[in-house]
Image: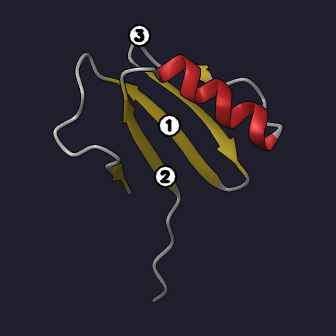
Amino acid sequence: MNPVVDTVIVFTTRMEELAEFYRAAFGLDPPEGHGGNHLGMRVGSLYLGFDQVEEEYEHPGAVTL
C-alpha cells in the first residue's frame, strides 16, 4: 500500500493573508471558510487548509499531514 497525502493544514496567525498568497501563487479558486478559524481550498486532489491561531504555534513551520 502506498501512502497518499490528501490533506495539509497550516497553523498560522495570518490565515487570510497566507491563503491569499497560495491562491495567487497557484491560480486557485478563492478559499472556502469553514467556521471562523479555518479556510481551505483544493490544489488538484490535495486539500490545503489554514487554521487561525491567536499566538505563534509552539512548533513554528509545523504542518499537519
Percent coordinates x, y for residue 53 in the rendering: 29, 22
Circles 2 and 1: CB distance less than 8 Å?
Answer: yes
Residue 27's quadrant in the figure? top right
- The image shows residue 41, relative to residue 54, as above or below, that is below
Q: What amino acid is at disc 2?
A: Thr
Residue toward you, 44 or 23: 23
Q: Find the distance from the CA under tag 3 to the CA under tag 2.
A: 19 Å
Q: What amino acid is at disc 1?
A: Gly
The disc at residue 19 is none
Residue toward you, 35 or 21: 21
Q: Find the distance from the CA under tag 2 to the CA under tag 1.
A: 8 Å
Q: Earlier in the sequence, mark 2 or mark 1?
A: 2
Disc 1 is placed on an element classified as strand
Q: Find the distance from the CA under tag 3 to the CA under tag 1.
A: 13 Å
Residue 31's quadrant in the figure? top right
Judge from the rendering whether residue 17 lies leftward or rightward of residue 54; answer left or right.
Answer: right
Mark 3 is surrounded, within 10 Å at the Cα level, by few (under 14), some (14 to 19) or many (20 or more) other residues, namely few
Percent coordinates x, y for residue 1 in the rendering: 45, 89
Circles 3 and 1: CB distance less than 8 Å?
Answer: no
Mark 2 is surrounded, within 10 Å at the Cα level, by few (under 14), some (14 to 19) or many (20 or more) other residues, namely some
The residue to which callout 3 is attached is 36
Disc 2 is placed on an element classified as strand
Q: Farthest residue toward the top?
A: 36
Disc 3 is placed on an element classified as loop
Viewport quadrant of the C terminus: bottom left
The disc at residue 49 is 1
Q: Look at 51% across and 72% down and name the residue there.
A: 4
Q: Farthest residue toward the right?
A: 27
The residue to which callout 2 is attached is 7
- The image shows residue 56, relative to residue 35, as above or below, that is below
